[in-house]
Image (spheres, rainbow, N blue to C red):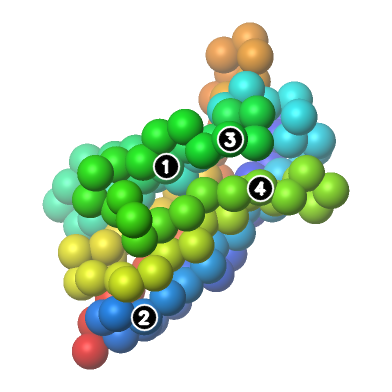
Amino acid sequence: QVQLVESGGGLVQPGGSLRLSCAASRNIFTFNVMGWYRQAPGNQRELVATISGGVPTTYVDSVKGRFTISRDNAKNTVYLQMNSLKPEDTAVYYCKAVTYLGMAYWGNGTLVTVSS
């Protein structure tokens, strides 16, 4: 069973930065795609960013130029660097990993609150 553990969430003021981490329990080379999703209260979960083969492949328009997804293969960890945070970025952020056979795994999420 694959475990994904997110960390790095918290309370930050508008304009601030946070870096989220997603640590996988196995070698991330076994995943075709890894990504970050978020779910704000009352909203559906939405894609934020994905990375495949070490190359960022997708960013939702609302975070382009502010968020950066990356990974550290040696640490089996995917990161989401979030800059210029806005109140509308407030959400629970989830890590997702998909294998080459299409199996999808989710973490339990980490809460990001952007407020003054």
Q: Which of marks 2 and 3 is nearer the N terminus?
A: 2
**Disc 4 residue crowd, few under 14, some 14–19, many 20+, Cα 10 Å:** many
x 58%, y 55%: residue:
79
Residue at mark 4: 71
Q: Earlier in the sequence, mark 1 or mark 4?
A: 1
How far is mark 4 from mark 3, CA to CA?
Answer: 9 Å
Instruction: Point out the image quarter for the C terminus.
Output: bottom left
Q: Earlier in the sequence, mark 2 or mark 1?
A: 2
Marks 1 & 3, CB-CB < 8 Å contact: no
x 23%, y 70%: residue:
86
Q: Earlier in the sequence, mark 4 or mark 3?
A: 3
How far is mark 2 from mark 1, CA to CA?
Answer: 19 Å
Location of residue 99 in the rendering, given as x and y in whole percent from the top left corner: 64, 20
The label shown at residue 49 is 1
Please tell me which residue lies in front, 91 or 19. Answer: 19
Q: Which amino acid does label 2 sit on?
A: Gly
Location of residue 10 in the rendering, given as x and y in whole percent from the top left corner: 44, 76
Residue at mark 2: 16
Q: Nearer the viewer, mark 2 or mark 3?
A: 3
Which residue is outermost to the bottom?
116
Element class at badge 4: strand
Residue at mark 3: 55
Element class at badge 1: strand
Residue 109 visible in the displayed image: no
**Disc 3 residue crowd, few under 14, some 14–19, many 20+, Cα 10 Å:** few
Residue 46 in the figure: left or right of residue 100? left
Residue 1 in the figure: left or right of residue 110? right
Task: Specify the quadrant of the image occupied by residue 112.
Answer: bottom left
Marks 2 & 1, CB-CB < 8 Å contact: no
Q: Which of marks 4 and 2 is nearer the N terminus?
A: 2
